[in-house]
Amino acid sequence: MSPHFVITLSPGRRPAVTPPHWQRAIADKFDAGAALSPAIAALLDRFSLPVWTTHEYRPARRDWSDDERASGLDRIYRLVLRQNRDIPVGLIDAIRLLPEVADARAGRVAETPLPDSTPVAAALSSRGDDFARRAIGLPAARRLGAGEGITVAVIDTGVDLEHRNLKGALDRGFDFVDLIDGQADFIGDKIGADEVPQDEVGHGTHVTGIIAAQGSGVPGGVAPQVRILPIRVLATMQRGEERVGAGLVENINSGVKWAIDQGADIINMSLGVRHEGGGLPHREVIDYAARKGVTIIAAAGNDGQEAFYYPGAFPSVIAVGAMGPDGAPSVFSTYGPQISLIAPGEEILSTTVGGGVAHASGTSHAAPFAAGAAALIQAYARRRGGRFSPRALKRILTHSADRIGTRLKDPHAGFGRLNIADALRLADARLT
């Protein structure tokens, strides 16, 4: 995908010609030449900037639903530069001033550190990290179910599609990664969205194992009978000795909407983006998820500072920080008023690429404990003939958490430590 920018038209405004979706335009660019409006076309001419005009999202069905329209998804367009050059200075600001435009922003690559994972020999993996599971009351919770009938989308670096602990749980996913061709910093698969969300670095596989591993040589997942929808939105960037997960913010958004439209009940996003001007990252698709009753769990961040990372900073999202074996918040865990709760996030043993297992630390690995807990609660509610809204599910998880100190909410730990057993007891009381 070449450099691009995104335009949201004002309510009631429509282009004269409906452009194709950006994925179609990748292979069929001659069909994406229509301008959104005469004024936008004039600005592009003034800046001598030829573009392909594309739709940012596809409707879930033949036409846009009320929920899609309410979230503004039908009014968002991606304009892709036909030349590999920078967006001219002043163009975005000029477009924002047009009356038919609600917002305009440059596309950008979002980055998230990939915490180092330590491979573990099969002979050592039996030691496990049972302290993490015991600390959140998982053994007692599992007596009430294992997540049957619930679909959890993992939006990440993909999943090892042949891992023996995972492949039985995987539904058909999608790879939305499509970065700038020839960018030397990226390694592995970076071009061409397709139907093979294969993980290359292990981050998404490790996260998925925490939710749904079958327990062969590795601790069983929190909800091992869920269905996993694997969605790859992050490629791998090599920066010196560090590896970073990187992907277009817009393609991450496409992955979220696709997961919702495929029927995901819960979405795990072990990633985060800082707000750097313009509209809040992911705002439209997070709003769409709330309207569709889909719960989103996100990692809080790993900079050890008070900071807002999105989507975790949205009120409708469950933002999860990390804790160590002593139950205290991890020193690297980002904190602030947006933190909902903390979960195990240090030296967590789970699945990795190549069919192996590994230890890894970070809020990325704390979030899936909460995602698995949400799946157990929704599965229990479904067996009782009910279903919790995202707001109710967040309230159950936070109100049943083990408090840290005397305050109702702690800036480092939110409402406290995840307690799945108590969460299920509270869910049972609410259902009754």
Image: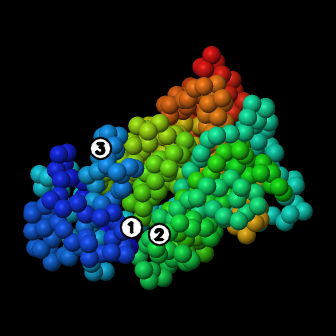
406 or 309: nearer the viewer: 309
Tell which residue pokes out farthest to the front in this image. Answer: 62
Which residue matches tag 3? 69
**Label 3: which secondary element:** helix
Residue 420 drawn at (x, y percent)? 69, 33
Amino acid type of disc 3? Arg
Q: Position of residue 211 (x, y in %)?
A: 68, 48
Q: Which residue is painted at 81% across and 64% down in the image?
A: 120
Q: Which of marks 1 and 2 is nearer the N terminus?
A: 1
Residue 359: tell me if it is visible.
Answer: no
Q: Quadrant of the N terminus?
A: bottom left
Residue under label 2: 193
The amino acid type, in three-letter code, at marker 2 is: Ala
Q: In the rendered view, does 37 fall on the left or right side of 218?
A: left
The answer to whether the residues at label 1 and label 2 have Cβ atoms under 8 Å apart is: yes
Q: Is mark 2 on a helix, strand or loop?
A: loop
The C terminus appears in which quarter of the rendering? top right
The residue labelled by disc 1 is 23
Residue type at mark 1: give it. Gln
